[in-house]
Structures are given as structure tokens and as C-alpha cells.
Amino acid sequence: MSADGILASAEAIAADVASGKRSAVEVVTSFLAQADRTADTLRTYLHRMPEAALETAAAIDRRRAAKESLGPLAGVPIAIKDNICVRGVPTTCGSRILERYCPPYDAHVIERLRAADAVIVGKTNCDEFAMGSSTENSAYAVTRNPWDPERVPGGSSGGSAATVAACEAPLSLGSDTGGSVRQPAAFCGVYGLKPTYGAVSRYGLVAFASSLDQIGPFARTARDTALVQSAICGRDARDMTSRAEATPIDLNDLERPVAGLTIGVPRAILDEAGDALAPSIRAALTSAASAFERAGATLIDVALPHARYAIATYYLIAPAEASSNLARYDGVRYGVRRGDGDLRAMYEATRGAGFGREVTRRILLGTYALSAGYYDAFYLRAQKVRTLIRQDFLEALGRCDAILMPVTPTPAFPIGEKADDPLAMYLSDIFSIPASLAGVPGLSFPATFDATGLPIGLQLVGRPFDERTILRVARAYEREHDAASRVPPLAAAGGGAP
């Protein structure tokens, strides 16, 4: 498709709008039309904002006509996961308990996107309170994968990933607690970045597990991913975990070759996975490693000996924090209220009607792990193992510039296949959870496709606050392979001829 279509990069769109080659209204209208064609089939959005988006676009056009300076994302449509607050817009977290909640403020990342002149076009579907790996746990809809609508898009940010893959928006935001940006990015064939913990303010992100949650971007190119990360990163006084070390990324850095870099591959993890790691994923990893080696990078084996305990560790820490965070949903202060009678009956009725099965399961698990007599045995021990996992990554990254590993053990699986098997669903995140526990950045990048045409993403893990290096490595791969440029037939059919 020509550069002025819906397949254009966010970088190209912003340049066209700033130069006057295209109007912001024209850009937004084209993406809204694409969403009209595909969003209801894929169930990507929970709330769309066409009128507000066009008003914002028109204001950008007026400023350009007045020769005012525009931001780096001028006129670029962006979709927002429905657990990130947008002032006056429904923010449900995919849950019935918040079905009528409209926040009175913008999240920090929304403020930053508005300052960059991005255009917010809607709120995307997600697993309830970001708890899930398939976007089947939403209380409102099951989102479908644009490459095969009978398969899941991943989760919990499945709506955000599918929106970008289907060209309904060139950019989106999701949140990643244990893989919820990277896993759906891999399933949908787009880029998904989990920044370093603290690189992006969590102010206005509805909390799941506060020591793990991070907001991150989806995009169709490495440079676009860097553009969004640069727009939203940095210190925010309202989030004391945010860090000033997170700085914008110079796009010129992404064009530097990988020659001279060292890339680690944790081969022991791959061996331990055995048959659980699909042959197509293993082959893609081997092929990518060879490609980096041909490009001049040095490949070494690295050890992450405690990564095998990541799933057990995560499913003690994250539910424990969820148990604490979700205690606020009681039917008193905001959200839905159910039942009459005494306070206890109202609490029970509200939470029973408002929370789905997966959220209830994790609250119960977390409450148990924090209870008297079990705190030391479970939660405290899990925190000690988390420290060991972080030390493993820091030691490995002391020997290499980035770690190459799978994002997921398989490509996207059929809708319903794991819905009634929580353990099988949890194992979908076996390769993404370790980086989350370590607090280091992880990037899912489109690598190739399997024999059935499903996308395969691979993961690059980097040093704390060194997102630029993993994006540089991914950009080098992108220049030599077409996986990032391909779009689902469903999207291309709506967007015109390539």
C-alpha cells in the first residue's frame, strides 16, 4: 500500500500531517473506516470515540494551518487498553464491577500522548483486570485474532494487539504484568514492548499487581515502538516508582548495525521446555540467532537457573497483590453495587456479580498466600526467589547486550482450547514472566510465520532502562525480514492493494 494508506507507519503519518501532505482528519477518518469494517468481527474495542477523535484531529489541523509546532505523534490514531484511565471515557477493565465507571482524570500516559498530539480513538478489550492470556476472560466479549478469527489474540492486552494487527490503529497501549503486552504481540504479529519497571508512570493504570504492572506500546515497526515509548516514559511525581533514568530514544540509534553486540541465548531453558516448545518456535529462534550472527553479532550461551521457578513465583506474588488491590471494589466508593440488607451481604452480592471466575480465583489464591501462617511459607519465599531471578538476569546481561528467547511456547491457540484449564493457560506465559519478575525490559518482535500462516514472535530482553538496544537489535532483524510488514488478509482487504 502507498505511504498515505492505513499501512503507513506512525512515523510517516506524523511527518505527513506536520508537513501538510495529509490532514489529521483524513488520517483519522481512514482508520475509523477500517475499524468500522473489522472491529465488530474481531471485537477489538469496548468503547470507540469517533466524534472525539475527529474533533482532536480537526484541532491539530487548525494548529498546523496557523503554523504552530506539532508533537512527534501529530495526528496519529492510538487505541488504549481499557484499564488505563481516560477522562470521561468508560474504563471498565473488562469487568462488570466497573461497567459504568468513567474516571474524572487522565492517566499520566494519556497526558503525555495528548501533549505529543496523538489522537485517542477508543478503549480496547482485555481480560478482566488484566488477568488472563487469551482475552477470553473479558466480561463483555471474546476478542479474535486477525490472522485467524478462530484463535485467540493473546492476553491480557489482546484487544490492543489485534487493533494494531488489523490496521484499525497504527499504535496502541497495553499493560504487561507477566507478559500481557509481549504475548499478544507475538500471537498477532506486531511489536510489543514491556519497558523496564519504573520507566513509565503507572498513575492512572488500574492496578493488578503493583510491583509488576507496566504500561507498554504496540506498533507495527521498531521505530514506531520507540516513538511511543519516548512519548510516555520518564519521571512522574505521582508515581514514586517511576524513574528519571527513562529517557527518550534517538531513532538514529536504532539504525546502527548489530555488529559488535553480544546476544545471549538461554539454551538450558529451551532444553528444559522439551516438547512443550513448538517446533516452529524453536526453528524461528534458531533462524533468528543465525541471522544476528551473520549480521556480525556474537552469540553466547547464558544461564538463567532460577527461571524454572518463575511461574510458581509469579502466581504467588501477583495474586497476593491483586487480593490487596481489588479489595477496594466493594460497591461503596465507585463501580457497581448489588444487593440490599447489611454491609456484608452487599459486599458479597457486589463482588459475586461483579468479578468473573479468573479474577475470583486469583483473589482467593492471593488472600490464602497472605493469610496468617502461610505468609512466610508462600509470599515471603516467592519474593526471595524473585530476587534470585533478577540476579540471574543481571548477571547474564553483564555478559551480553541482549538475551534472545521465545515469547510463548506455541503460536496462537484456538478459542476455548485452554479456557477450562487454568494451569495450561498460565503456562502460556512461561517465557514472558521471568523478565517481569526481574523488572527488566522485554520486547516481542515479529520473526516469521508458521506453516499455517500464524505469526511467530520472539523476545529480546535487555538491561534496565536500555530499551534502545533491544529495539536496535529488533530493527536490524526487521530490515532483513518481511514479517513486520505483512498484515492479515482481513486487514489488507479493507485497506486497498499493497
Image (tube, grey):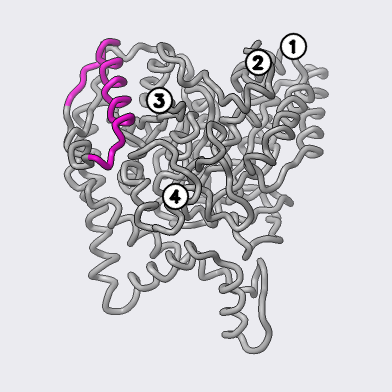
The picture quadrant where one finds residue 466 is: top left
Task: Judge the density around disc 1: few (<14), some (14-19), many (≥20) Cα neighbours within 10 Å.
Answer: few
* Disc number lying in front (4 or 2): 4
Residue at screen point 26% across, 65% down = 380
Residue at numbered disc 2: 15
Task: Judge the density around disc 3: few (<14), some (14-19), many (≥20) Cα neighbours within 10 Å.
Answer: few
Asked whether the beta carbons under mark 3 and mark 2 sit within 8 Å of each other, the answer is no
Nearest the viewer among 79 and 215 is 79
Question: How far apart are the alpha carbons under marks 1 and 2?
Answer: 8 Å
* 417 within the magenta span: no
Q: Can see residue 381?
A: yes
* 277 within the magenta span: yes
Residue at screen point 68% across, 84% down = 340
Question: How far apart are the alpha carbons under marks 3 and 2?
Answer: 37 Å
Task: Judge the density around disc 2: few (<14), some (14-19), many (≥20) Cα neighbours within 10 Å.
Answer: some
Q: Position of residue 67 (x, y in %)?
A: 78, 17
